[in-house]
Amino acid sequence: MVNPVTLSTLRAMPATGEPIAALTAYDYSFAVAVDAAGVDLVLVGDSLAMVMQGHASTVPVTTEEMAYHTRCVARGLTRAYLVADMPFLSDADTQLALANAAVLMKQGGADMVKVEAGAQQASIVAALSQAGVPVCAHFGLRPQRVGQLGGYRVQGRDDRGVAQLLADADALQAAGADLLLVECVSASVSEQIKARIDVPLIGIGAGSDCDGQILVLQDMLGLTPGRAPSFSHDFLQDTHSIASALSAYVRAVKTRQFPGAEHGFH
Ligand code: KIV
């Protein structure tokens, strides 16, 4: 009998020094494989718009599509904690956010929802949290804002940018976020963020000092068409099967071998 990972498990991990190993998954078969490899947290990311549906960004995916994929993944998990992304504008105001979080949790079976948010969206995080919804707040590079950002860029590149990220972290934690996920910042910025928050900090392209790491499944299996992000690593090229690539990723995260300096921004 496996002990399922709960929010309490995840909250306790930073104190024990054991990194949280997280990956995305979008279907039943990969959910089974990722769970068997010992991944602690599985995210049904809105990246599915790109890697499953072939869109150029995460913007087009709908809440109903997210709920469908979340339901498929939920059937494959016995241990890992399940997080589902709130897609673009599904959390544009409090009422929408509550209604769409309900779809992802009740129909999709998600344990938690993830919202892309900064300090300006803290009231949405607070409303979800006050309604009893566990929330992961994703800040730093927010891929849903790629249209506004003009591309996928490292965040916090000057003092003003760093100050904004620190203010985002403070506001999101104060609003009740249970986990923070930071994308595409330097290791020194994620260290500063980590030093001021009590909730676990999961990083993607954010250096090795975070409490956990996440990658997009297709990136870490070398399946992404074109150039994979520089912060990722193709674990399948080092081994002979998907199962061993997934286990190698979990091992590399748990032993802090991944990410290495070559996967970071300076
Ligand atoms: O949608 C997604 O896959 C994500 C990860 C990049 C963290 O948000």
Image (cartoon, rainbow, N blue to C red):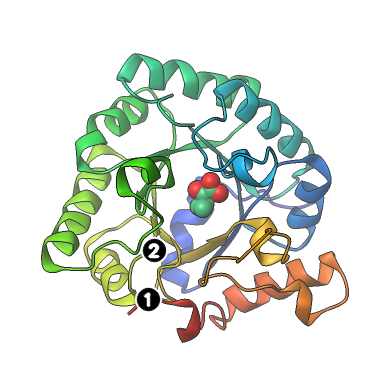
- State the residue in front, 52 or 94: 52
Query: Residue at image x 62%, y 73%?
Result: 233
- State the residue in front, 46 or 83: 46
The residue pinned by badge 1 equals 265
Amino acid type indicated by mark 2: Cys
The residue pinned by badge 2 equals 184
Tell whether 75 sits left or right of 105: right
Tell whether 3 sits left or right of 152: right
Quarter of the image where the C terminus is located:
bottom left
Q: Is residue 102 above or below residue 248?
A: above
Q: Is residue 250 above or below residue 182?
A: below
Crowd class of label 1 (few under 14; some 14 to 19; many from 20; radius 10 Å): some
In terms of image quadrants, where is residue 72?
top right
Q: Is residue 8 above or below residue 210?
A: above
Q: Are marks 1 and 2 in contact (CB under 8 Å)?
A: yes
Whether disc 1's CB lies below 8 Å from ligand 1 is answered no
Give the x, y percent position of residue 70.
66, 33
Amino acid type indicated by mark 1: Phe
Query: Residue at image x 73%, y 65%?
Result: 221
Query: Residue at image x 44%, y 36%?
Result: 134
Give the x, y percent position of residue 251.
67, 76
Of helix, strand and loop, which one carries label 2?
A: loop
Tell whether 117 sits left or right of 63: left
Q: Is residue 14 above or below residue 90?
A: below
Give the x, y percent position of residue 264.
43, 77
